[in-house]
Amino acid sequence: MNDGRAQSQDLGTHHSMLIRIADITIALLSDDPKLKVGAEGVMKRFVTHEGEPDIEIKARWANLPRESDGRKVFNSGALWQLYSNNGFYTFQFTSQVLGAFPYKVASFNQDFNKGEVAINRSYFDINQYINPIESPLDEVLLVNYLSKGEKGVEIHACGVADTLGRGFLFVGQSGAGKTTMAKLWEDEPGIKVLGYDRIILRKMNNCVWMYTTPWQSEAMLASPARVPVKSIYFLEKGQKNEVLSQTPTNSITRLFACSFPPFYHHEALDFTLRFLEEVVKTVPTYELRFKPEKSVVELLKRCLSPFSLHAFFNTIASI
């Protein structure tokens, strides 16, 4: 590091790594010769070897205290708790499987573009490769970073791209049918399923893009990809297949209910609502009531045909 930014040519060693998710590049650096950074599993697909980092994180071994300094802001009810102290945010990760002390503590500035991860040396083999932002920190970090500077939102959704490179987003909570919808599309010629569960939306150059993430229920689909979103469908199981137009207000409400904003930050919640308002201004939204069978795919293929009349989408379509 020279001017405070990690240069891409310096990365890719045992002590540095670049990860890119949703066109956001994260530089992971270790100044400690005994801490080697690396990725494993699905995250290997998101490793890159070029580009200037948007987020820079230094990792180090440490002997961690039982509780972090500062005011406790949020308790996830699972592995992590969030503290605020002198303008910095600190995430403390504890697992009873490992012990009573934190296994990792990550501190970030207010913009979440610079940080440090301290890893409890007593819980790890110092000879193994370590991913300092191993899940769930990677997702927590991205969710917070996206909410700063109007960068994007993570959504409970599955994504499908057609042969023309157009993306179609199917949104819903657990049980709404995202996995079912993705599987119905999988064997369609020229169709690419981008994700079963978690998609990041970003708006750039008046276009809403959807990105796959590493945090998919089906790991084999987790690989870097993005497509422009051409339409959004809110999933509802029904007795027949129908496509129904949605009002902007209803669409914003339904998207927000399926989003992952940092609920502990009022500013982040305000941003999320503004961002989703821009999404529905840019992309048409519909409710899709469907039977879990191939007939819904045939209906959607007719709806999505480039030769379909736009007016078709303003009526109830059924098969």
Image (cartoon, rainbow, N blue to C red):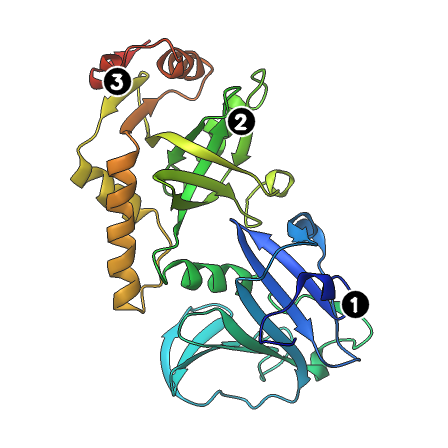
Marking on residue 14: 1
- Judge whether 26 appears above or below 230 on screen: below
Secondary structure state at the residue bearing disc 1: loop
Question: What separation in Å lies between label 3 and label 2 (alpha carbons)?
Answer: 24 Å
The residue sitting at 54% across, 47% down in the picture is 213
Which circle's residue, 3 or 1, is located before the other in the chain? Answer: 1
Which amino acid does the dot numbered 3 rest on?
A: Phe
Pinpoint residue 1: horizontal percent, then vertical percent: 65, 75
Q: Is residue 233 left or right of residue 31?
A: left
The quarter of the displayed image where residue 15 is located: bottom right
**Other residues around mark 2 within 10 Å, as few (<14) / some (14–19) / many (≥20):** some
Return the disc, 2 or 1, that comes first in the chain's sequence. Answer: 1
| Number of residues whose C-alpha sits closer than 10 Å to that of mark 3, classed few (under 14), some (14–19) or many (20 or more) | some
* Circle 1 Cα neighbour tier, 10 Å, few/some/many (<14 / 14–19 / ≥20): some
Image location (x, y in percent) of residue 283? 30, 33
> Of 116 and 120, which appears nearest the observer?
116
Residue 125: numbered disc:
none
Mark 2, mark 1: which one is toward the viewer? 1
> Could you tell me how far apart the alpha carbons at marks 2 and 1 are, in whole angstroms?
39 Å
Describe residue 32's horizontal placement relative to residue 54 as left or right. right
Question: Residue 242: x and y, percent?
Answer: 29, 18
Give the structural element (helix, strand or loop) at label 2.
helix
Outermost residue on the front side: it is 3
Residue 183's disc is 2
